[in-house]
Image (tube, rainbow, N blue to C red):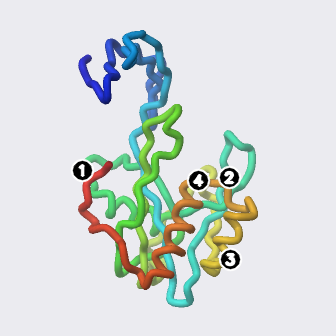
Amino acid sequence: MTEAVAGYRVLSRTERFAGPVFSVVTDEVAMSDGRVADRDYIVHIGAVGVVAVDEADRVVLVRQYRHPLRRVLWELPAGLVDVHGEPMVAAAARELAEEADLVAGRYDLLADVNTSPGCSNELVRLFLARDLSAVPDGGRYERTHEEAELTAHRIPLDEAVDMVLSAQITNAVCQVGVLSTARVRDNGWAGLRPLDSPLP
């Protein structure tokens, strides 16, 4: 393997675990000082999240159980990029429908988030969704497992910002989404990138 960035070069890679969502690998890396070190990390398939804002300036947040933390978190509607060939904005629309029973008439690109770059390459692309309407009753997704107990709530955006600052919202993707949306709103919804912007 020869990938190199600013003097760092991967000499070999060993896969320690392979699953449907992520794998765990060890890279042998030649450092810029010439020394060699092993680096363990998670290779993730990627995800999308949606900050859905309604006409009353409320953001749609979901309550979802997260087993590694053994608690229920405030989060954005979000999910894996696990459908081959599906555009990321389409994945975001699918997650909004599945987790919040909502359809959006407008999407904009909001932010790209590396969730934990010290141990994972996971990237979550966040979309801003507006012009919201309900998914018709007959077309609603049947949620299972942890998602069966998922509930969606509409929180005033400024209150959601306070929830970030008071540690009621600790999910990093949700924090970025809420704070970015508040900033964009305060700027008159300016500064959003095109939907087809390349991933970082």
Q: Who's the residue at 50% across and 81% down the image?
A: 186
Residue 149 visible: no
Which residue carries the number 4 mark?
172
CB within 8 Å, label 2 to label 3:
no
* Residue toward you, 88 or 29: 29
Callout 1 amino acid: Gly
Residue 123: % across, % down: 42, 46
- Quick one: label 2 or label 3, which is nearer the N terminus? 2
Q: Assess disc 2: are there few (<14), some (14-19) or many (≥20) residues with their C-alpha within 10 Å of its C-alpha.
A: some
Residue 25: % across, % down: 44, 21
Which residue carries the number 3 mark?
159
Which residue carries the number 2 mark?
65
Residue at disc 1, secondary structure: loop
Measured Cα–Cα span from mark 4 to mark 3: 17 Å
- Quick one: label 1 or label 4, which is nearer the N terminus? 1
Residue 40: % across, % down: 50, 21
Q: Nearer the viewer, mark 3 or mark 1?
A: 3
- Quick one: label 3 or label 1, which is nearer the N terminus? 1
Callout 2 amino acid: Tyr
CB within 8 Å, label 2 to label 1:
no
Q: Assess disc 4: are there few (<14), some (14-19) or many (≥20) residues with their C-alpha within 10 Å of its C-alpha.
A: some
CB within 8 Å, label 3 to label 1:
no
Q: Quadrant of residue 162?
A: bottom right
**36, above or below 122, in the image:** above
